[in-house]
Amino acid sequence: MTQAAVKSAQGFEVKDHLGSHDFIWDKPLELQTQQSIDRVLEFFLRNGRMLNIQAKGDVVTVAKKIVSDMRHHIPDTLQNDMNEMMNYLLNWLCDYCEATNTKFLDVEFSLKK
Amino acid sequence: MNIPARINPDHIEIAFPHSRHAHDKAATIVDLMGGHKARRFEMNGNGSSAKKDLGLLSVIAGQQCFLLTGSRFDQQDIRDFDNNINGGPGLAMAGNDQGASPQGGAHQPRPDLALIRLMGSALDTTPPALINEISALVHTAVSEQEQEKQIAINDVLTQLVDLKNLSEIDALPAGQERMTVLLQELTQNILSTSIENFDNQTFSHAILDLVQDQIVTITKNTSVDLNILQQDMQSIAVRLDPTTQYAQITQESAAVLKTLLESGTITQEQRAEIENLVALLESDPETTPALTLSRSLATLSPAVMEMIAAQNLSNGTDIIASVKDVLHVRLSQEMGVSVETARAVDVAFVALLDNHAQMMAQPENLSPAQQEILSQLNVSLAAFEQAPASLANLAQILTLQNNIAEQFTTQETNVNPGAAAELVAATTALSEATVALVAQNYDLNPAQITLLTQALTAPASPSSPSLESFVATLSEPQKLDLQAEIAKIEILSASGITVPISETNAPLQNVQNIQDVTVITPETPSLVSTFAQIATASDNFDAPENISTVPSVTEISAASVDTEQTPITVANQDLQEPDQQINNITADEQTRPDGAEIAVASVATIAATESEIKTETPSTPDTPKTSQTQVEARPAISPITPPPPANENKSPVQVTNQPAPTPASPPPPQSGAPSQPPAPATPPPPAQPEKKVEEFFQKPKAGGEDTQKPEVILPKADVPPPVVAPVAPPSSPILQQPSAPPPPPTRLDTFESPVARPAVPETPEPPPRRRFEGEPKTLADFMPPAPVNDEPGDPSPCKRCPLGGGSCDGLCKTEFNKARGKVDGESPDNDPKNDPNKDPDRDPEPKIPEEELEKIIKETGLPEDEIVRLIKKGQKALGDDLEKRVQEKGLAQTLLDIKQAKELESEAIKEGKEIDTSLKHLKNDGAKPSTIVVSPNLGEKIAAPTSQNTPKTFQGNGMRQRTPRMN
């Protein structure tokens, strides 16, 4: 397993993924990601949109369904925000499945008002 | 700052709230693997306590957020997690002393998670093949090789994820340096893993394609110099192109083999073998099937094999292994299946070839039946070589598998039991590999595969699944893909190769039963040629436009039992009761163990049938083998054509002998038209087959609700589709009694006949003038007015024709004259029965002018209503004599006479006497001659009808004679 790590000139440590990295729940939420979540959430609330995505299967199938269904609800102007938000969500899923060795999931992704 | 979440081994809840709640205490991890990241929550003013057992929403109540809730549903996952907890050093979640971390335990590489991390939100654009491949690798990796492959793929994908992460901090020099190192490691990792055998490489085409794309994508916005990876990238590019790889390997192999030919130590036979192999290697891949090259490699003599094996390619690999590798890749590419599946098919194919050759090497140990089966196997393998993914070939292999198992294992044989078992095992392996190939090629699920194999192998019985039940499970794209394949199977089933037919009484079963007898007949050498013919014909099914060129079922059937090169037209009506004949054959088959005798009997039976057919269907030697009726019976191909009813014992081709409408045939009778009696030589068909003709032309039902056996319906080239005459429903008595001539046409029918009627004008015909109530009308008005120029052919304009201007060519005059000819009898136009608006039982109300009425009242002393009633009664009783009587005696006297007669009748009725209500006794009663002179208009007034109820009885010269009824 690769354990290479380099330090940037600013001292920021870059680790390879499968190293003893922190899980996402141990990392702070980046401001850019929070702003993307805000914009997507505001879009749904402002337009009175409903969201309820249900997926069941292996992790890849579940993740793919959430992304593809979510993309249909988001206008083109918010695709970048949606991508940012989905990347963050998928990282949560992956870290959870990696930590718990989960292969099959039954997931519901919805908007709660 | 973090987000609210509850993370448990079997459940996860993640909330994505708005940033305005960022400073809430709830915006933290609520629960982490049973531990408490935060023990106190504000609960938005609802109190504060540790609420780890509550749902996340109850904790963050009131927040508008996206919520992801998930739970694992695979119990094996939970067991694995428990094992990790028990076997590992403990949970080491950050900030949680009770957390569980599998990091310390036995950790399985997860290429699926690496793929998600790599693709991120672009996961929906990932090729499904790649997702399926990685999912299968994660969930089914059992063998050591698969686990190594899993680790290798996981490493590559992880390296790509790291590259991706590094690219996001490209501005950092250390990041660029690290990216360059990672790229070199990545490419070397790929190339070193897959350099030996192409088909055994770890990385599939999809993964290599992904790697290449991701490298370009990741480094696109970076300053990483990819030139240092140029050679490696080119090598990967070669890997990504199997065609290039195939050409490279085959050309190099052919070059090495040619050097062998230059040596003088090889014999002529060895030279021929090598030259043949070189020719195949240098041939166009599009014209040479991959399995043909594989067969050539498998049938090399041991000496040549050793000579070739001693040679190596430039990369150090031997020729045969390399060629095999590229063949498998090519086969997988052609079939659209994985390399593993293609390899399994090739291995099983070669093994069966080897076993077949071993069996045929000792023919003295084989019984005639075994020799015949091996001959069929050879033919089937030849067909399989051309189209491995064909359902028809699969059906053949499955059928042969059963026959071989029966002939070589269950019956006494001189064959070595071990060799027989190997043959059976090889056949089974090929059938299984072919099933997997077909499943992948047509994207069939296991249930569909089970149905298909059962339909192809199960004996014909009502309980066995049919092909229709399999077709019913297919999606529309699958049906389109499999349409030609299903048709091939139907042809095979009809050709006599024992492919089960689902319905015992299905029409094709009759054909099949006859041919089935010949299948096990060693003395029918035409069987092999028949199958070759079928195989050749089936190739034409690849393109829909070639379907029409395929020999018909009966043609192939006839060829398989070829006696005089005359088709056994089972479609002929002489086989309307084929069950009896077939039952006889079946009985012979059951009672006679000798296949040859069965064959003789069967062929004799068929020949007898054929002779009968010939007597009924005379044909010259030049007559085409397929009669026109047969051809016309085959509408457009439709493998899922609704089958006939289960109790339909008649052959479907019987339908073909229905008196098909031809240009010389009389037009079908139409209602009201002058009917032509049916020709006695062509009795009308029974109702049910007529219905089948319609069914043939119906669009197949997608739902497959009718699970009966589909029929093969093949259109014949250059034959127009039959024109199906409109037929009555099966329950029509006309069809049940077809010989009964239709009733003779009445005059009304003739008058209304569309044949006799002139052409319908395009201009709208003016409606007949309707008289308004109270309009004066004379008796003469009810007479047809003398037409002006009413002779047919009279060039003068027809003034009574509604068309006007004589555009009817006098035909209306003809009809008018016909109507005039009925003046003495009845006029069809004025028959109230023919006018739905007219009530024949309701008499018109006579209208009498007031002056005339007052005069009559004075003369008779009768009230007005009584006068009217008497007039009506007189009309009923006397008919046309009423007018005469009025002229003779006057209206008043006539009314008095009628009144008197009515009184007499009333008295007679009271006394119970039988009376004559016809008032005929008044007709010749001259005892009371009338002195009243009826004015010329009086009769008109009497007969004046209402506009709605025109008294038709006044038409013509007199009133209609009918029996009056007295009240």
Image (cartoon, helix red, strand yellow):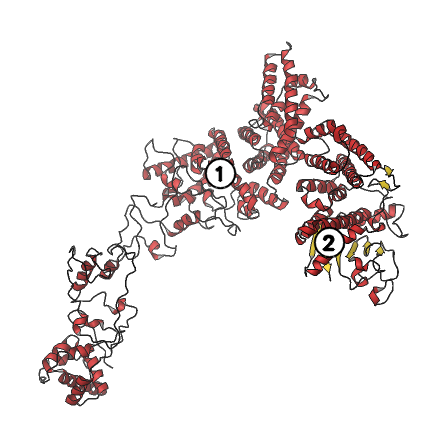
Residue A3 image position (x, y, % from top left): 86, 37
The residue carrying pointer 1 sits among few (fewer than 14), some (14 to 19) or many (20 or more) residues within 10 Å by Cα, namely few
Identity of the amino acid at label 1?
Pro
Residue B335 image position (x, y, % from top left): 60, 35
User: In the displayed structure, does residue B254 sit left or right of residue B592?
Assistant: right
Q: Residue at x 71, y 20 (%)?
A: B314
Q: How far apart are marks 1 and 2 (CA)?
A: 45 Å
Residue A5 image position (x, y, % from top left): 86, 38
Out of A41 and B262, give the one closest to the viewer. A41
Using the image, tell me which numbered label, if any, was put on residue B607: none
Quadrant assignment for the N terminus of chain B: bottom right
Using the image, tell me which numbered label, if any, was put on residue B544: 1
Q: In which quarter of the image is residue B117?
A: top right
Disc 2 sits on a residue from what chain? Answer: A
Q: In which quarter of the image is residue B125?
A: top right
Q: Find numbered disc 2 in the image and state the secondary structure of the residue it sits on.
A: strand
User: In the displayed structure, does residue B879 sit left or right of residue B558?
Assistant: left
Q: Residue B69, can we see it? A: no
**What residue would you read off at disc 2?**
A107
Residue with the most extreme top position = B264
User: In the displayed structure, does residue B743 sit left or right of residue B375?
Assistant: left
Residue B325 image position (x, y, % from top left): 67, 28
- The answer to whether B860 is drawn above or below residue B295 in the figure is below
User: In the displayed structure, does residue B542 sit left or right of residue B171?
Assistant: left
Q: Residue B472, can we see it? A: yes
Quadrant assignment for the C terminus of chain B: bottom left
The residue carrying pointer 2 sits among few (fewer than 14), some (14 to 19) or many (20 or more) residues within 10 Å by Cα, namely many
Q: Find numbered disc 1 in the image and state the secondary structure of the residue it sits on.
A: helix
Identity of the amino acid at label 2?
Val
Disc 1 sits on a residue from what chain? Answer: B
Out of B686 and B647, give the one closest to the viewer. B686
Label count reads: 2
